[in-house]
Amino acid sequence: MNFFQRLKEGLSKTKDKLTKQIDKLLASFRKIDEELFEQLEEILIESDIAIDTVLEIIENLKNSVKINNITDPMDIRYLLKDNLYKILSKKDDNILFALNPNNSNKLNIILVVGVNGTGKTTSIGKLSLLLSQTGKNVMLAAADTFRAAASEQLNEWAKRTNVDIISHKSGADPGAVVYDAIHAAKRRDTDVLICDTAGRLHTKSNLMEELKKIRRVITKEAEDDIVETVLVIDASSGQNSMVQARVFNECVHIDGIILTKLDGTAKGGIVVSICNELDIPVKYIGIGEKADDLKPFDAKEFVEALFDI
């Protein structure tokens, strides 16, 4: 099964809640009127697209219908598909800085952050595999010193992907781990250093301050190296992920998002809100448990999979 087929399968719950409901709605109307738009608005909101984004989409659809003299309700399906594609592709920046050819002669540091249980450590393992397969020399930094199992899990991924790892004992200062990892990476001519961090609730100000400290260490030691902060979000958290992204972005400035667990949720519509309202690109999506189930986000592919019958 190719990735598009897996993506279609992974989005099946979101399709049930979004596109299949829209198709039923459009088939039940003989003309385009205000009631149709009101019911369409409800479906979009229920599929975890934020209200401001929904209102923007509805307004765009109404304008398109008027300008193009569209009368067939089923044509709204194509207008909506086009609208979603424009939103998802407007910040067309899904490539990691580490994969930009212009950054190939520098150390690329990726700081990975997120709340507990989003699949952060697993995503780092999958990302290290993906980068290694492109020929990059990758190193991992086990800066989640709070949870002993996190370091063990990351060590397992390091073995599986055949990459170096820098770790300290449980309870060590995560800033010290990152400091040591940066200097080790420079000595070993590493291309990409991926730093794991402890999962933290965005509501805990002391833990967010710790994250700022880690970021300051990286900024100071990186000098003119390339630094990128990536937030891992569990797609099933729906609208709560918007709050998470805003707080983390205010704390450490988020350059991109990895959206995990898309295959287990009907809340895949959240990706539309993230791209539209936060102006942060979704760089990778995860649709399964396999090591190769993390792939670069492709707006066209995502929309095609969502609307494919």
Image (cartoon, grey):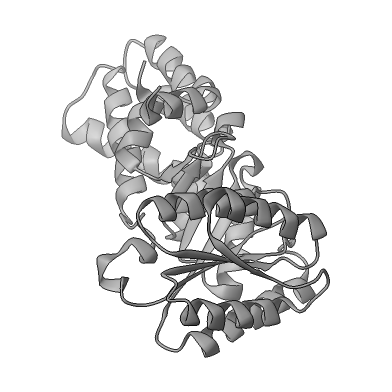
Question: Taking 2 as reference, is 284 left or right?
Answer: right
Q: Is residue 286 left or right of residue 31?
A: right
> Quick check: 119 left or right of 21?
right
Position above or below: 8 against 210: above
Note whether 285 is above or below 92 in the view shown. Answer: above
Residue 204, image x and y in percent?
78, 68
The x and y percentages for residue 188 are 47, 76
Is residue 259 rendered to the left or right of residue 4? right
- Residue 220 in percent (x, y) is at 54, 90
In this view of the protein, which residue sits in the foreground, 36 or 187?
A: 187
Rendered-image quadrant of the C terminus: top left
When asked about the image quadrant of residue 17, the answer is top right
Task: Name the quadrant of the N terminus.
Answer: top left
Q: Is residue 231 visible?
A: yes
Q: Which of the two residues, 307 or 28, is positioned nearer the viewer here?
A: 307
Q: Quadrant for residue 165, please give it.
A: bottom right
Q: Residue furthest left?
A: 68
Please give the name of the residue rendered at 52% of the width and 72% of the height, measured from the top-left corner.
253
Which residue is pictured at 34% across the width and 43% down the height?
298
Q: Where residue 119 sits in the image (x, y, percent)?
A: 64, 48
Q: What's the residue at 52%, 20% (across, down)?
A: 16
The number of callouts visible is: 0
Q: Is residue 62 visible?
A: no
Choose between 12 and 102: the one closer to the eye.
102
